[in-house]
Image (cartoon, rainbow, N blue to C red):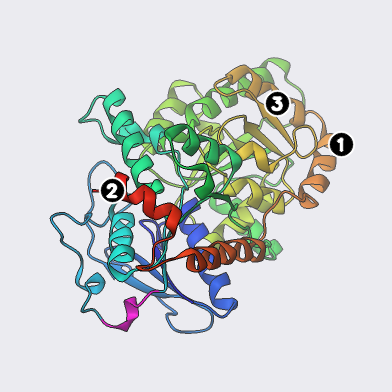
């Protein structure tokens, strides 16, 4: 099966979507299929390893960057019938896809939809992101209007698919509320590969790189894009409370450090807030890290802290638990579905700085409980595997192909598209 994976997020961008796509592409290739990743061109970056081993082909399309989100180039959607030359009917066999699987409902997602219609092949899409929580990226429109327009577009786009994959039950509930047909939805979490072996020298290098002493100082770790929707203000304010409490109580233990691994548009705000709260000396910002660089960072951490209430899954949570890290998690989005409150994590109410601080403080004060949670995290049955993810998605593909009637559109999706699509 030749599958076109249309995604706005791919190397060198590292986030939950790019990780999911890369993992799926590798598993599809290992299963004997032929995935082709269609992604935006990234200035100064060249793909390596194409057509070698189990790697997928990567087709890069012309992209543009904006001041609102400069780290993520995107492909202009098909306006007035325009399409990149590689996606036009006269293009070569590199784009002869049996099925299209889009990862976003915008630029490249719309090109993927257009391709599927014109070539008469099934269209599958994954809903990775709670897009209504990203209205602040469109400051030129009033937020209520942005949300209305977004909801309308999402409903039309996903109802026009043959199947819609959601990484969590919470994500499925969001789409149902928007009016997406329930019969189209399939829950398939992103699989998390086993962690690589981390050599002691790599751990020492990570400690030196980020000024983390090897004296028992607790390290709280966040991994992810530094963006407003990740609710990092809550994390910084909870950490400030922790610092105040440690100073008040005194004692011989070294005060904790907070390590924020990642980059993004909210970095200057985070730095400024850390300064205003008087905690800048105890906060470390790593900047962009590759997957190989992240492994020793997980290894030096004491706890994983995840304040976001807008992630549909929170792949980094499963990554942290594969390294044996207890977690403190906000009860929002799909992330809580992948931990067990009181067993391998503590789940706290969204927006509650005091509760987040209290959970972190309780675990730091109880090494025996942390050790028990670490064991539980390593043994968790909730951590999805790449092979399991691929098996489920291949089943979705096969059902979409089997359900296609004349013209490549399943009967259920065709009825919706007839009324919902322009």
Q: Secondary structure at mark 1?
A: helix
Asked which quadrant contains residue 396, the reply is: bottom right
Q: Secondary structure at mark 2?
A: loop
Q: How far apart are the two marked residues, 3 and 1, measured between alpha carbons?
A: 15 Å
Check disc 2: other Cα within 10 Å, few if <14, some if 14-19, many if 20+.
Answer: few
Local packing at callout 3 (Cα closer than 10 Å; few below 14, some 14-19, many 20+) is some
Position of residue 162 relative to residue 238, above or below, is: below
Provide the residue span drawn in magenta: 92-97
Image location (x, y in percent) of residue 323: 71, 53
Is tag 2's residue or tag 1's residue first in the polypeptide sequence?
1
Magenta-colored stretch includes residue 411: no
Earlier residue among tags 2 and 3: 3
Q: Is residue 81 left or right of residue 341?
A: left
Q: Which residue is mark 2?
A: 421
Viewer can see residue 120: yes
> Answer yes or no: do the residues labelled 2 and 3 have beta carbons within 8 Å?
no
Q: Position of residue 82 (x, y in %)?
A: 15, 61
Where 387 falls versus 295 (above or below)?
below
- Mark 1: give few (<14), some (14-19) or many (20+) Cα within 10 Å: few
Foreground disc of the pair 2, 3: 2
Reading the image, the residue beneath label 3 is 359
Nearest the eye: 314 or 254: 314
Mark 3 or mark 1, which is nearer to you?
A: 3
Q: Secondary structure at mark 3?
A: helix
Q: Residue at x 26, y 41 (%)?
A: 68
Distance, label 2 to label 3, CA atoms, is: 48 Å
Q: Position of residue 393 (x, y in %)?
A: 57, 62
The CA distance from mark 2 to mark 1 is 57 Å
385 over 2 or under it: above or below? above
Q: Which disc number belongs to residue 368?
A: 1
């Amino acid at each position: 099966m030749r599958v076109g994976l249309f995604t706005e997020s791919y190397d060198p961008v590292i986030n939950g979507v790019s990780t999911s796509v890369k993992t799926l592409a590798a598993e599809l290739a290992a299963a004997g299929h032929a995935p082709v990743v269609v992604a935006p061109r990234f200035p100064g970056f060249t793909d390596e390893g194409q057509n070698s081993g189990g790697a997928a082909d990567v087709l890069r399309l012309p992209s543009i960057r904006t001041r609102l989100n400069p780290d993520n180039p995107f492909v202009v959607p098909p306006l007035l019938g325009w399409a990149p030359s590689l996606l036009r009917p006269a293009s070569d066999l590199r784009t002869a896809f049996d099925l299209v699987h889009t990862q976003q409902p915008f630029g490249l997602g719309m090109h993927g939809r257009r391709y599927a219609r014109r070539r008469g092949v099934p269209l599958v899409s994954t809903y990775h992101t709670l897009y209504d929580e990203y209205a602040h990226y469109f400051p030129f429109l009033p937020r209520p209007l942005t949300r209305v327009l977004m909801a309308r577009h999402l409903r039309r786009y996903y109802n026009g698919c043959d199947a819609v994959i959601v990484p969590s039950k919470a994500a499925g509930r969001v789409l149902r509320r928007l009016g997406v047909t329930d019969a189209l939805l399939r829950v398939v979490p992103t699989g998390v590969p086993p962690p690589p072996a981390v050599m002691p020298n790599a751990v020492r290098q990570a400690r030196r790189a980020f000024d983390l002493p090897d004296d028992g100082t607790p390290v709280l770790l966040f991994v992810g894009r530094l963006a407003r929707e990740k609710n990092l203000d809550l994390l910084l304010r909870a950490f400030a409370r922790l610092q105040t409490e440690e100073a008040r109580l005194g004692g011989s233990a070294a005060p904790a450090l907070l390590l924020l691994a990642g980059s993004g548009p909210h970095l200057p705000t985070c730095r400024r807030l850390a300064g205003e709260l008087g905690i800048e000396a105890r906060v470390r910002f790593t900047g962009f890290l590759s997957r190989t660089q992240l492994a020793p960072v997980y290894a030096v951490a004491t706890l994983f802290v995840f304040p976001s209430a807008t992630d549909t899954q929170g792949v980094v949570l499963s990554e942290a638990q594969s390294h044996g890290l207890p977690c403190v998690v906000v009860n929002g989005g799909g992330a809580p579905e992948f931990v067990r409150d009181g067993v391998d994590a503590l789940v706290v109410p969204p927006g509650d700085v005091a509760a987040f601080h209290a959970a972190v403080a309780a675990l730091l004060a109880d090494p025996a409980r942390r050790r028990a949670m670490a064991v539980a995290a390593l043994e968790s049955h909730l951590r999805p595997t790449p092979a399991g993810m691929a098996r489920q998605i291949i089943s979705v593909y096969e059902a979409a192909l089997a359900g296609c009637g004349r013209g490549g559109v399943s009967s259920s999706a065709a009825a919706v598209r007839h009324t919902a699509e322009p």
